[in-house]
Amino acid sequence: MNTCVDSKVDKSMDLNLFYNDFIPIICHSPHIYPKNRKKKVDITNQDFFDIIDTEQKAYWLGFLYADGSIGRYVLKIGLSKKDILHLQKFANIFNVKMCYRQNGKNVESYIQIYDKYLYNKLFELGMRNRDLNTIKNNIPEELIRHFIRGFFDGDGCISICNHSQKYKDKEYIYKRYNLSFACFSYMFANDLQDIICVRVKILKNKIIKHTNANCWYPSWGNIQDIKKFKDWIYNDSNIYLERKKEIFDTILLKPSTKSMWKRYLDNEITGGEYNDYKSQRKGYKDFNEYESKRNHKKNIKNHIINLCKNL
């Protein structure tokens, strides 16, 4: 059952009590239209996206590019229960009510607005086909980073995990970081990566495709690149998804344990020790055994090539 409550939610309330105690009401919001209802109802700030000239407009356009959808003159955007207060900010712009629905064990919050003028404007801004070239032509250069931050809050991910390496009966634990975006096409992912790399001044990486879905991921794992990206999108910014920014702050405050490669670059271990470590990782006793077997394979390969030439 869909339920609807006033958009002005008190931030001090206990959200768990809020969901458990309020009486479900069948949704009859004047801004949410059933299939059999086409009556036009005015909304506030209908011309919000006419000119993208503020941080707020650029951010929410990027957020809609990630989590929003348009069709049949309807704008729809939905988030999980944990992000209800963030979606609240968007609802307040147009003075619409948020609705809730049960999806299994989870509660989802969403907004659905029927407005032909707003739909046409978002269509012109490339939202239907997710065209970044249209974005670059309609958003000033100084606001591009706010658009990217909005898209990141919708379809971006920042994560950290621990990895271990064993060398000479000692286990070394180091942290691996990952910053990525989920994109619906390779062209969009490539254009997005170009925008970020040029402005943040970081290197491009290989774009990875999801094995079971049409989804491409431009990503970065270097901690310095992640720090540059964080500084670029958050400096002097007023609107963002707080839980993702907290992850950035947590990661960058924690000192990372060096990998064996980093220890070698910093002259903490010798080249011979690093080669022995690599050889042991591949199942060899030491680097000499690894080299002898690798040379043996090369000799066999060269011998086969010579035999083929003499045929």
Image (cartoon, grey):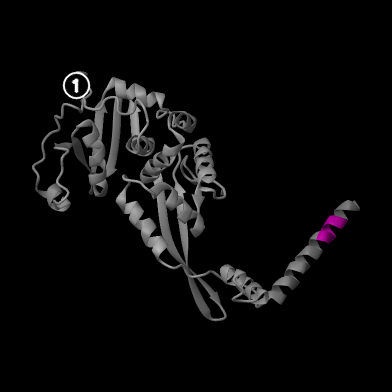
Q: Quadrant of the N terminus?
A: top left
Decide whether residue 303 is among the magenta residues: yes
Report the magenta residues as a range.
302-306
Q: How many marks?
A: 1
- Disc 1 on helix, strand or loop? loop
Q: Is residue 259 visible?
A: yes
Q: Which residue sits at x=81%, y=65%?
A: 299
Task: Specify the principal SS of the magenta part.
Answer: helix
Decide whether residue 222 is among the magenta residues: no
- Taking the view exactly as shown, the residue that stands out farthest to the bottom is 169
Q: Which residue is mark 1?
A: 41
- Taking the view exactly as shown, the residue that stands out farthest to the top is 39
Amino acid under disc 1: Val
Q: Which residue sits at x=11%, y=40%?
A: 24
Q: Position of residue 39 (x, y in %)?
A: 19, 18
Q: Quadrant of residue 58?
A: top left
> Relative to residue 34, is residue 74 drawn left or right?
right
